[in-house]
Amino acid sequence: MQGIVLKSTGSWYEVEVSSGDILSCRLKGKLRLLDLHTTNPVAVGDSVELENEDTEIVIAAIHESKNFIVRESPKKKYAKHIIASNIDQLFLVVTISSPRTSTGFIDRFLMTAAAYHIPASILINKQDTYSKKDLLKQDEMLDIYRNIGYPCHLISALDKKNIASIKKLLTNKITLFSGHSGVGKSTLINALQPSLDLRVGEISEKHDKGTHTTTFAEMLKLANNTYIIDTPGIKEFGIMNFELEEIGQYFIEFKALMSNCRFNNCLHIDEPGCAIKKGVEEGVIHEERYQNYLNILEGYKNNFNYWERKN
């Protein structure tokens, strides 16, 4: 019997089968022993085979996934934690204030999406709350991301602004929603499907951050063949075991220029004849995106040195 993993709570998994029933399953012992270089052998979105074993239903096999998205494991440094598998699209929910989403976080998310070949969109929530100053910052953000081809949608989950258009984009797809705690993911999902009645957290006035209302990824069904994957408020995504020279390829506006660099292994830092640096000087590449690239590259240099020593 085949099914799709909707939820994992550690030892037990909720799996939807073709009848629409949701079964509570555990993982077959031999699968726990597989060395998958991850902290979770089964992730939300995985297609699995189920078997009856004694009085329980067990996950006996995991089908190969078409894609997945990872973060560094919160429990084991330098180990991967798969957030979800078999994703059709990614929606990053961001806010200009209360809490502020930095372009550094956005660029790390978009880079990860590009690395795993998953289309990504940006949803700027809380349109009902922004001051004139916030709206100017929003215009700057839109100028950066729309110009390089990322769809950006202005929404208000509370007032249901543009919620109907977002719902259409979800039809017949598996969509992963992510963003910092407090940006309104749960409120948005409730607006899309009120019957889900997800718990909504409060914003801390002292720290301008949301409280964690989602503690693990969970797949939620909106309609036949339409699913949302709700994720915890994630501080950062990650890709691991990539060559340093690859990082620039996941900045989509870099890709068209990289072939013009003098050196094939150019890191676009201080090498002579670098087409990316020239693009920044000429305004073809936004300076903020380039600075975020440098920051991400520096972080990956540290991880890269770790993996070199480890292997």
Image: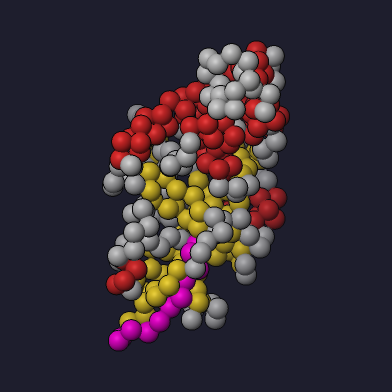
Of residue 38 and residue 237, the one placed in the foreground of this image is 38
Residue 228 sits in quarter: bottom right
Which residue appears at 67% of the width and 60% of the height? Answer: 171
Of residue 198 and residue 77, the one placed in the foreground of this image is 77
Which residue appears at 70% of the width and 30% of the height? Answer: 256
> Range of the magenta residues?
45-55
Is the residue 282 above or below the residue 152 in the image?
A: above
Q: On the picture, is 67 further left or further right than 155?
A: left
Name the main secondary structure of what is drawn in magenta. strand
Q: Is residue 243 magenta?
A: no
Q: How many marks?
A: 0
Is the residue 302 above or below the residue 269 in the image?
A: below
Residue at the limit of the structure toward the bottom, as seen here: 54
Residue 17 picture location, percent across and down: 51, 77
Does residue 240 appear in this view?
Answer: yes
Residue 122 picture location, percent across and down: 61, 40
Q: On the picture, is 306 further left or further right than 18?
A: left
